[in-house]
Amino acid sequence: MGGPREKDGPRTGAGGPRDGKELCVGAVVPLTGRLGSLGHPLAFVLEHLAPRLTRLTHDGRAYPLRLAVRDSRSEPGRARRAVAELVARDGARIVVTMAGTQVLPAVATACRDIGVPCLSTTFPWQAYVLTQGGDRGRAPGWTYHFAWGLDDIADVFADMWEHAGTARTVGCLWNDGRQGRLLRHPRHGFAPAAHARGHTLVDPGGYAEPGGGFAEHVRRFHEAGTDIVTSAATGADLTLFLRQAHTAGLRPRLVTCSRWLAYPPDTRRAATAPRAVPPAPHSGPPSPSGPSEQVATLVYWTPRHPYRSSLDGSTAAQLADAYRSATGRAWLQPLGLAHALLEVATHALGTAADPTDRRAVAEALGRTKLSTVAGDLDFTTGPAPGIALLPLAGGQWQPTEHGHRLAVVSNNRLPQIPLDGDLFLTD
């Protein structure tokens, strides 16, 4: 399964985008470039659902429906152009996107500027709101997003830290960019959740990406007696830090990391900027010489999530099986969220006062309450306008003879997802 190809122009003829009768859902996907592997889940879902999403009935009237795909090429500038093309050439009534800390906000901002509703996911909501320039309260809103918060990540990570005991001293490996600033946010970042549970954070300050060395972080963590490290580093930077830490005799009992870790180690390694540092053998529990060990992460979707598609009632397990059958690969967490993007987008078209009016579609998004294969989404009660929350569990990549599996090791906030592994800690 090669995934959808970029569509360079509109379909012509009866029901085409220029006659106001056809409904088009546009998708901006990183099909190529450094984020290409991260765009694969949405590319698969678009191809998987395209044969089913050919018609939409609204108030007794049937509209032709199609999906149009544009490649962001993993670049913010190209992503903005992709939005413009989807609207001008394909007549998109709504645009969906996911993946990329720079590309995703570029898509949302372009949609807002043009006046087309945007739906996105896989980005902590506080970071997302910040990228929208603080004017999200104006009506109608154009940009909508479902995910979790930085504070939610902090709580799930703290659940796992406490496997090592209460009141831990935790070293913070955070960059000096937007991501690091958000993690340090006095209200939404990690400190409130960590301090409320008795943990002490040791933050030596940010580092520029890609990291050139972490000697000061290692020294400060050593001096503070940290036995846990939390991070949002790239795979390459985390590998470099852990190698330098091990050389200096610092061996954390547990590392928690949110960035890239939702994807399997091989996928995440491919999406990280090239470095002159050999890749780690794995990012799960250790082999005797593996430096990138005992790394835990967040879990937002698995085939065992007890939810069904609002489109056809298919289960999370069936979606994972379809992906495996088509690609020969194991399931990926973003699959569920990618599928939910299309569920919510078509729901908004189907419930808008006028599905051909982009403003009406945007207003329908703001009213949306929908059970999807990724979970129950409610855009009317989120922490900020246009935001719907998803709950998180804690997981750990654990090696098997066939690669890695993401074991659910903490489900305090998502008890309906059963545990299927024990959290590995270094003694």
Image (tube, rainbow, N blue to C red):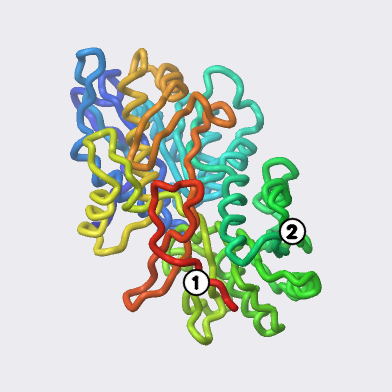
Q: Is residue 29 above or below residue 245?
A: above
Q: Amino acid under label 1?
A: Ser
Task: Residue at 50%, 37% (x, y): give it.
Answer: 389
Task: Residue at 45%, 19% (x, y): give it.
Answer: 363
Residue 16 in view: yes
Q: Is residue 76 above or below residue 204?
A: above
In which quadrant of the rendered image does the C terminus lie? bottom right
In which quadrant of the rendered image does the N terminus lie? bottom left
Task: Residue at 50%, 26% (x, y): give it.
Answer: 142
Judging from the image, what secondary structure is the residue with disc 2 in?
A: strand
Residue 420: which numbered mark, if any?
none
Residue at the front extreme of this rendering: 165
Q: Is residue 163 above or below residue 314?
A: below
Q: Residues within 10 Å of mark 2 (few under 14, many from 20)?
A: many
Q: Earlier in the sequence, mark 1 or mark 2?
A: 2
- Residue 399, percent across and down? 41, 74
The residue mark sitting in front, 1 or 2, is 2
Residue 31 in view: no
- Residue 337, percent across and down? 39, 44
Q: Which residue carries the number 2 mark?
A: 201
Judging from the image, what secondary structure is the residue with disc 1 in?
A: loop
From the viewer's perspective, tell me whether residue 422 is left or right of residue 324. right
Q: Quadrant of residue 313?
A: top left
Q: Residues within 10 Å of mark 1 (few under 14, many from 20)?
A: many
- Residue 315, percent across and down? 26, 44
Say which of 362 and 201 sits in front. Answer: 201
Q: Which residue carries the number 1 mark?
A: 283
Q: Amino acid under label 2?
A: Leu
Q: Quadrant of residue 255?
A: bottom right
Task: Residue at 72%, 41% (x, y): give it.
Answer: 187
Say which of 28 and 86 sits in front. Answer: 28
Q: CA distance from mark 1 to mark 2?
A: 23 Å
